[in-house]
Amino acid sequence: MDTPTDVLHRVFGYDSFRAGQQEIIEHVVAGGDALVLMPTGGGKSLCYQIPALVRRGVGVVISPLIALMQDQVDALRALGVRAGFLNSTQDFDERQLVESEFLAGELDLLYLAPERLRLDATLRLLAKGEISVFAIDEAHCVAQWGHDFRPDYLELSTLHERWPDVPRIALTATATPATHAEISSRLGLSEARHFVASFDRPNIHYRITPKSEPKRQLLEFLRTEHPGDSGIVYCLSRSSVEKIAEFLVDNGIAAVPYHAGLDARTRAAHQSRFLREDGLIVVATIAFGMGIDKPDVRFVAHLDLPKSVEGYYQETGRAGRDGLPATVWMAYGLQDVVQHRRMAMEGDEAHRRRQAVHLDSMLALCETVGCRRVMLLDYFGQKGAEPCGNCDTCQSPPESWDGTVPAQKMLSTVLRLARERRQKFGVGQVVDILLGKKTAKVLQHGHETLTVFGVGADLGNAEWHGVARQLLAQGLLAVESDYGALVLTDDSASVLRGQREVLLRRDTLRPTRAKVAASSKAQAAAELPAEAAPLFERLRSWRGATAKEQGVPAYVIFHDATLREIATTRPSSLSELSRINGVGENKLAKYGESLLEVLQNDT
């Protein structure tokens, strides 16, 4: 029987495991259950793929990523792994072929959507075969406190009841201590070994900027820092997705929309283009991206505030899976806070409480004057991290200032409108009153006669909107769900009475990172000796043509890291090529001669 190290080298072409992988794999190979928390790009897949190849039988992988199963299977087959999948996209003949391969022992790995385990036919099929391991991918989907709850995952606890001798491994990249505990409880993994790796992604630069003109800001970010790079832009609504995608195309940037309102064929086509083309941007709602294996996503941008830190971490984790520098950028403003505060008031009491907790944590991350990475890691239970030096607040520390008096002025205006006029208004009207603007709306309601009229002339319009945003973020103001009107909270009184100091973050539009550091593309190129760069580009061209011919994403052929190593070391034989990371036996046999031909033509 092959050892895990043998399989790692022979199949996957790597000489050594990443941190934490070997211990997990050996535990599962020995028959133990495991719950694995490991960041995106940390190598979770190998933690179940290698045990499936070492143990007798077929590894069954439960995954919600129906749209990506074909690509996952293609990538494994390119390595010589016998993989298949069963989901609702297949016709009867396709399913029957895969079922026959499973029963004949001709598969190493079988991918299943979780809803298929509700079908008696699927359970009968699995009972007839020999199963080596059950892998439950994206395990956070079982947690109702998490950000991507899927009811079908609640049924997965029955796996251990039906197959008590088959080891289970549940894996996720996003789980707070509370979500971790819920996964363990719902999947019956309290007796399993729990492996928790660091959630840190040191290659990612985190940046949040005040939102002023989001389209213009996004365009500047793309042109100055990521020209020609692949990336994802997230928006909250389908309408925004369409408008931003159209805006980028109009400005000469290749982009496609992705949201649930598009028909399935269009979504599949846009996802396929993103996986297969270099330099394409997908503008999407959060429906896009989970499980995307594209390693060279150089940036993830948010034009709307994510609903939770877990969701934010999951979405941003799609950047820089290859370990090269990547940027996570967000434009964040007052309307984000107003909209999310209103949304958090919808639903039953338990739902409102969950939403409020998630939102408060997300707002704290946006408004912090400390290191964003430290706050992220702390959220996921990784305490005591040092400031990273690779986020905006580390590179350009923001100022905090005593905003107690401005806070009192704004809260007093809201109070006087409610008490003296029995009126409630949104932020715009409150700011106009503070600034002493005699607008038609102010004069219509007689607000120029209020004692607070004009008391805020010491700050500008944008500064007052920043004060309102931060008071909302701190829970010192609230919004009513229907019209977005401002109202006081239980904590407002202590500020009005002078019993509580209010510290605020001073908003500044920071220079883009491109002005203080090289772009990600330049940084990636800098890792290559100058003389190797032309060969690297020729290897990329060869890979692109090969991928197009085979109808698979380019990274299925080889990752950039492998091509960089080939371009740098210039192997001259199949034996030397076999020692390159990422060149396993099957890929050596399939592509070795073609690669050597490219290398020989370069001499």
Image (tube, rainbow, N blue to C red):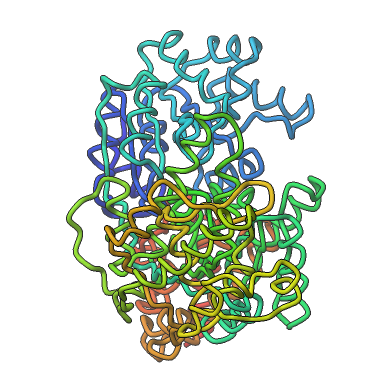
118 with respect to 579 (left or right):
right
Residue 362: x and y in percent read 43, 54
Count of marks placed on residues: 0
Q: Quadrant of residue 77?
A: top right
Classify 557 as above or below 27: below
- What residue lies at 73% left-to-right and 68% top-to-bottom? 245
Relative depth, front residue between 63 and 468: 468
Q: Nearer the viewer, residue 508 or 161?
A: 508
User: Which sits in the foreground, 536 or 328?
Assistant: 328
Q: Is residue 588 visible?
A: no
Q: Quadrant of the N terminus?
A: top left
Q: Is residue 505 visible?
A: yes
In the depicted structure, whether residue 278 falls above or below residue 547: below
Residue 489, position as x, y percentages in the image = 45, 49
x, y (%) of residue 108?
49, 31
| Residue 312 horizontal/vertical position (percent) | 47, 54
Q: Residue at x 35, y 12 (%)?
A: 165
What residue appears at the point 46 percent right and 62 percent down from the top-left corner? 411
The answer to whether 280 appears left or right of 55 in the picture is right
Asked which quadrant contains residue 133, the reply is top left
Give the residue displayed 33% in from the left and 49% down from the top: 9
> In the figure, 150 relative to 482: above or below?
above
Q: Nearer the viewer, residue 444 or 486?
A: 444
